[in-house]
Image (cartoon, rainbow, N blue to C red):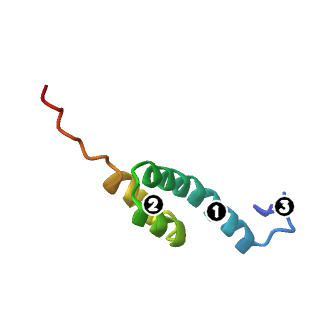
Amino acid sequence: MSPLEWCPFLPWNTLLVLLLVAWTLPWKGVALWKAASNRQLWWFVALFLLNTLAILEIVYIFGFSKKKKTPPEAA
């Protein structure tokens, strides 16, 4: 029994593309959301235009999207 018997009209490359899109879209959405909320225009543009199969998005989310802490104001 072939793994694609449930859907014989989809060739392997189409299935691969669908899996890659399903993997990339959530990462890209979170990264774009964080870049926009942190007002990081250049990161937003780079994340929007470059397709790195979520590598750049994961690096941004875990490495560069942290908000800088501001010291509390003295009264």
Looking at the rendering, in which quadrant would you find the N terminus?
Answer: bottom right
Q: CA distance from mark 2 to mark 1?
A: 14 Å
Q: Is residue 6 left or right of residue 24?
A: right
Q: Nearer the viewer, mark 3 or mark 2?
A: 2
Q: Which residue is mark 1?
A: 21
Q: CA distance from mark 1 to mark 3?
A: 18 Å
Q: Is residue 38 above or below residue 69?
A: below
Quadrant of the rendered structure where residue 7 is?
A: bottom right
The structure residue drawn at horizontal position 17% and vertical position 32%, both measured from the top left corner, is 73
The amino acid on which the numbered mark 2 sits, given as a three-letter code, is Glu
Q: Find residue 7 and name its label.
A: 3
Q: Is residue 71 left or right of residue 59?
A: left
Q: Is residue 20 left or right of residue 43?
A: right
Frontmost residue, 53 versus 6: 53
Frontmost residue, 61 versus 8: 61
Looking at the rendering, in which quadrant would you find the C terminus?
Answer: top left
Frontmost residue, 74 versus 46: 74
In this view, which residue lies farthest toward the right? 9
In this view, which residue lies farthest toward the left? 74
In this view, which residue lies farthest toward the front? 75
Label whose residue precedes the other's in the sequence (1 or 3): 3
Q: Which residue is mark 2?
A: 57
Q: Position of residue 2 (x, y in %)?
A: 78, 64
Quadrant of the rendered structure where residue 71 is?
A: top left
Frontmost residue, 50 versus 54: 50
Q: CA distance from mark 3 to mark 2?
A: 31 Å
**Circle 2: element type:** helix
**Circle 3: element type:** loop
The structure residue drawn at horizontal position 81% and vertical position 68%, both measured from the top left corner, is 10
Label whose residue precedes the other's in the sequence (3 or 2): 3
Q: Position of residue 27 (x, y in %)?
A: 52, 55
The amino acid on which the numbered mark 1 sits, given as a three-letter code, is Val
